[in-house]
Amino acid sequence: MTTQTLSLVPWLVATPLIGAALLLLVGRLSDRWGHWLGVLASTATFVIGLVVLLAMLDVPAEERLGTQTVGTWLDAGGLTVDLGFRVDPLSMTFVMLITFVGSLIHLYSVAYMSHDRDRRRFFAYLNLFVAAMLLLVLADSYLLLFVGWEGVGLASFLLIGFWDHHLPNAVAGKKAFVMNRVGDMGLIVAMMIMVATFGTLDVGDVLGAAGDAGQGTTTAIGLMLLLAACGKSAQLPLQAWLGDAMAGPTPVSALIHAATMVTAGVYLLVRSGPILEVAPDAQLVVAIVGTLTLLFGAIVGCAKDDIKKTLAASTMSQIGYMMLAAGLGPVGYAFAIFHLLTHGFFKAGLFLGAGSVMHGMDDDVNMRRFGGLARVLPITAITMGLGWLAILGVPPFSGFYSKDKIIESAFVGSGWQPWVFGTAALVGAGVTAYYMSRLFAMTFMGRRRWTSEAGRATDDLVERHPHESPWLMTLPMIVLAIGSAGLGFVLNAGDRFVTWLEPVTGHAEHHEPVLPIWLIMTLTLTLVVVGAALALWQFATRSVPTTPPPAPAVVRAARVDLHQDDVNETLVMLPGAMLTRSLVFADRTAVDAGWLGLAGGIGRLGGVLRGLQSGYVRQYAAMTLGGLGVVVLVIWLVSGTAS
């Protein structure tokens, strides 16, 4: 790549960062036009990224790696960290996803947030989010990556709690922030081990030297990186914040779930693949965590009535598929990113579609009060329908090409692993088909539950007047729906995407799964059809009560996220509170009491001595004579003893 092209790379981060700074510094003066500045900054970043991508495509595959160093950032002792950017097929894949989908979400937000008096500030935070995520994926050192990592955490906190005048929203933002800080400690510890082992935090140097480190060291680094990824990507056991994050405006949900925050953990693990490859135990744990999370999220999604929380559970599950693929080693790296890319399109479209439904339904999110909306929201129904088919993995939609590749890869290997991972991935596909078909049916099919037969409000029903969203909202949805339909086919043709990533992920030798591929595909599609048919039968052809009916224990547990908050409170919060109270008690009864007792004793001694300072001369003379007598007596006794 030419120097001229690489010189554009810093502007990928600087452009949205400047946009955010201007919107925050100018303040209310930009209320009339600030949102368009935000859109312009994001779109300009996409154009810059496209120029860099086209230049990269013009060079041979082995030359598609470039670095652009702005200068030395940190020089402390033997550690030197440059302010540098790493441009390769992996980072550019993320750049295009972040800027393209992010720009569509910016455009959608112009109309969605049109009545919010703080819309200018909202766009400043969106620009900040995009800038932080771009810094994360372009960083040429783990320390600079960490700056972007924390920037994403800050932006998510600001956006999830954007409507912080409502207490639950503020609490949701704080919950996401705190849980992510737990994961961030993993990345900090991983960097400490890197410095101690390799003496550097440069991405290329660390990955290049990973094979020379001991397996215990690389396992520790791998597990710490996994902990960081679990926080950002909402994987077990740090997944509890994701559902609460739906408190933010819907465009925030689309940005977090499709193009930025939750994809960061997958990026970190795939980028650090050479470390995981020489740490098989850590790699196995990555696959196990991904498998458990994809099932956890799918089960939770089956019981949610909140349309946004259903999609949040879906994201948790789909990221679980990507983590599973990342834990499979080189055979799964490219498929993890492939699914991440297609997921970015159909999940963004589904979230924006949910926002369109809310726009027409007075911000209601309860699917039990929807139904029959396809007739009054036709564009929303069609675009969400394409996203629905894509996430189900119905051919020829994009999910079929990306998720099915992960399922096939999960069946590759020996021993118990392919049977456990492959079976779990198959089951997840069937459950995904069920809960996503449930969402679509409850929202767009069946009887209208937002109006009475007489057209009047009833005791348990508020009369709605749903209407299609304006073009600024529907246009991004249409573009994303087109991507949901065709992106997988385009990228899969001739293994185009896998070949594109090979300079980063390496060439993975083809291995046959333990089951024939045709059988895996047949089983997957069968489970998808069964799951979808069951949901459509239950929620499109039968009456759906507007209040949740009595349900078995497992359904009640899924409605409250399988008691994940209760588990966290029992295992972490309550012991932490007890430890804190114990330390406070010990501090007060031992440390404080000891020092206060010493101070009190000195004070009492001072009180006694103060009584001797009466100011009477005769008392002082008596004390002097008495003291002199004592001295004479002592001398006499000593001299008598000596003789």
Image (cartoon, grey):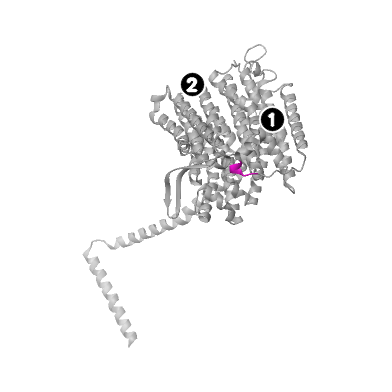
Q: Which of 4/185 is in front? A: 4
Q: Is residue 37 left or right of residue 542?
A: left
Q: Is residue 219 above or below residue 234?
A: below
Where residue 425 sits, quadrant-wise, is: top right
| Alpha carbon separation for disc pair 2 and 1 | 35 Å
| Residue at 48% over, 44% down | 144
Position of residue 527 measured from the top left corner of the image (x, y, whole percent): 75, 32
Residue farthest toward the left in the current orientation of the protein: 617
Label at residue 392: 1
Position of residue 472 measured from the top left corner of the image (x, y, whole percent): 53, 20
Q: Is residue 40 above or below residue 502?
A: above
User: Where does label 2 land, which residue?
Assistant: 115
- Name the amino acid, label 1: Leu
| Residue at 70% over, 23% down | 544
Label at residue 605: none
- Name the amino acid, label 2: His
Q: Main secondary structure of the magenta part?
A: helix
The residues colored magenta run 502-507
Query: Label 1's element?
Result: helix
